[in-house]
Amino acid sequence: MNVSKKTKLLGLFVAVIAVSVATNLTTSYLKNNQSNGYVFKGNNIPVSYTSLGGHSAEAASTGVDFTKAAELSVHAVVHVKTKIPVQVQSFGIPNDPFFEYFFGRPQQKQQQEQPMQEASGSGVIISSDGYIVTNNHVIDKSKEIEVTLNDNRTFKAKLVGTDPNTDIALIKIDAEKLPVILFGNSDSLKVGEWVLAVGNPFNLTSTVTAGIVSAKARSINIINSKMPIESFIQTDAAVNPGNSGGALVNTRGQLVGINTAIASQTGSYAGYAFAVPVSIVQKVVSDIRQYGIVQRAVLGVKMQTVTDEIAKKLKLKSMNGAYVADIVDNSAAAKAGIKKEDIIVKVDDVEVKTASQLQEQIGRYSPGDKVKITVIRDNKEITVTAELKNSHGNSGVVSSESNTAMLGAEFQELTSSQKDKYQIDYGVEVKSVDKGKFKDAGIKPGFIIVKVNDQAIRSIDDLNEAFNDAINSSDQFKSFNIAGIYPNGKIAVYGISLAD
């Protein structure tokens, strides 16, 4: 036998041994890993289930037990369903009372029940007697709110109050001895810490997903209001449409945030979700229950996060803090001695690294509270005391009733006969005018308000909401336009300023 043949036989022998060893190892692997959910299908590509493998020794060694947190929170998360009026168009023409006033109402149009669009989200029970926190955008403009508990009981809910600036709302159902979620501490959350998102994505009730805290104090410019407060907890827990208003909980089952938004180009989960911290939620809910409206504390500065350009200009040693771009005259900041181009780095000894963190810290206080503000000026640390004010520029309690009183008018909703007489579908009548903003603007009794800043006014609640939006505006002029008609057919538009 020549050398070539010996070499071929030796190679064949080695190949046989290799195949035998590989077969034994594969068989052993499959046998030892069946409990982990590994299977082989089709072209022998390994596929694993996307469960967390809570029963494996490896998972147990991490010390993370999601079952307890899920059990403690899932019963306190509810399914919120709403009905929202749909604006009907006739012959392609918007249902606009001004158009109908000038051109008449189409003859074919008949009085009929207004169609409703259904929407849904989630909510969190915070008291055994039926108070539930959710997102403002879940119930915004809804005429009916229905709540389904985890045990499938269904209740009609009433709206207690909303805060568009934080996208938080409070609703109430008539029930007792409900399961309640415990409040945690969102301040103590750390990036990388495990959290659970509990809600009703795509109407799949009582769904729990897990992820970690990806970032804190995140501003994403999603809240469309005059004075938005955005300091979101960012997570990679799967959150989808329907999760809004649901719970973000820590591994102890404590509420640390209200799931609100996702970063997505498709409208479905794409890796990142955002929740309002419970530190903000507690303040908002407490104020709504006590006053009916949030007592928003205002420092009176226009701010932005420190950029590299600002740091170089001011020769800063650090880029942490909120840059004061401007100061509102006679504001809390102005009276405390805060100056333009100061860098706010602390609020009552709590470090502030970004503008959104400053918003979050100030948002925890009420008008009249005195807080220590630490600023960097000329690379020196200076601490001043500021007495925070409300949106009216004083330290008193603000209420929806006091807001309406500023107008100096009484209102009443239109009757069906009035709607037919004036050929309009909605509006609120000015019943009487006394000393106040309406009289100063020249508005007379009998005037029918149809729109405020292009927002249709269908009820007194709509009017109060539009007025409160103007009150809470960051615009120093705080003005709005009122459009409507008088009984004699005269159309009028008035501009009202709330600055003074």
Image (cartoon, helix red, strand yellow):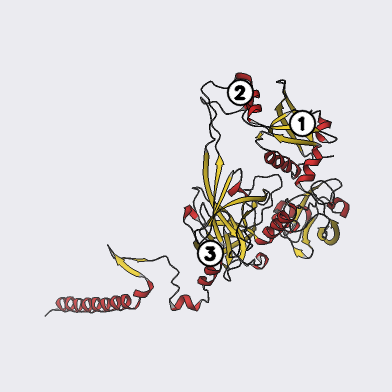
Neighbours of disc 3 within 10 Å: few (<14), some (14-19), many (20+):
many
Q: Residue at x 27, y 79 (%)?
A: 24
Question: What residue is shown with label 3?
Answer: 74
Whole-number angstrom distance, CA of label 2 to CA of label 3: 50 Å
Cα separation, mark 1 vs mark 2, equals 23 Å
For badge 3, the amino acid type reads Val
Q: Position of residue 317 (x, y in %)?
A: 76, 61
Quarter the N terminus occupies: bottom left
Identify the mark nearer the N-term, 1 or 3: 3
Callout in the foreground (1, 2): 2
Q: Position of residue 143 (x, y in %)?
A: 59, 43
Q: Is residue 306 left or right of residue 405?
A: left
Sequence-wise, the earlier of marks 1 and 2 is 2
| Secondary structure at numbered mark 2 | helix
Residue extending furthest left? 1
Foreground of the two, 401 or 396: 401
Q: Which mark is residue 286?
A: none
Disc nearer the start of the sequence (2/3): 3
Work out whether residue 498 can be spotted: no
- Amino acid on which the number 2 mark rests in the picture: Glu
Q: Which residue is mark 1?
A: 495
Judging by the rendered image, the residue that carries numbered circle 2 is 100
